[in-house]
Amino acid sequence: MSEEQRIVSAVGSTKAPAEVLFELIADPSQQPRWDGNDNLSEAAPGQRVHAVGDVFRMALTKAGAVRLNRIVEFEEGRRIAWKPAPEGEAEPGHLWRWELSPVEGGTLVRHTYDWTELEDPKRQERARATTAENLQASLDRLTALAETEAAERSAS
């Protein structure tokens, strides 16, 4: 029997600068625009995160559920990760991470979903449905949006 893969990632590159990408990630109100899981409904404006310990609220598409997302890793313009939890509940043990590395001509982007600490069998089943393809869809949407925004900024 093989070890179950509980960390999935997608990697890509874009012409967009890391700063533009990071703003789209660190401002939760922007996240539904690029969510490749089609799971995010909306987040109120004004929740831009700035440090480990910050928390943002996100409404999901399913039955209007709300998740509180606590920032657990943060380096402005480079890395951000959060642990979601249903409102009023403890964090179940999964993490979303974005890492941005400036390279010549753009940015290398890594998107990771880590559910190594997730113990609830029901939540594990849902976690298994989050594949590298889902992460790649988010990465692709994010980079396309960032490239458009970067082009608009440079044109104005």
Image (cartoon, rainbow, N blue to C red):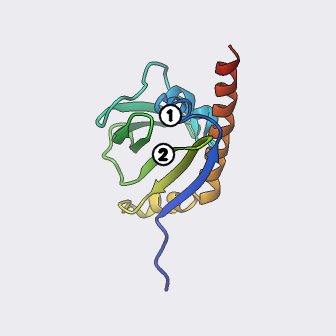
Identify the residue at the far bottom of this view.
1
Measure how far apart labels 2 and 1 are at the Cα level: 9 Å
Quadrant of the image occupied by residue 16: top right
- Mark 1 Cα-neighbour bin, 10 Å: few <14, some 14–19, many ≥20: many
Give the number of the disc on residue 22. Answer: 1
Classify residue 145 as left or right of residue 64. right
The location of residue 31, given as percent across then percent down, is 55, 33
Query: Looking at this view, is 116 or 139 the one in front?
Result: 139
The location of residue 48, given as percent across then percent down, is 43, 25
The location of residue 76, given as percent across then percent down, is 39, 34
Residue 133's place in the image compared with 5, above or below, is above
Q: Which residue in the structure is indicated by mark 2?
A: 98
- Mark 2 Cα-neighbour bin, 10 Å: few <14, some 14–19, many ≥20: many
The residue sitting at 46% across, 78% down in the picture is 3
Query: Looking at this view, is 59 or 24 the one in front?
Result: 24
The answer to which of marks 2 and 1 sits earlier in the sequence is 1
Amino acid, disc 2: Trp
**Quarter of the image where the C terminus is located:** top right
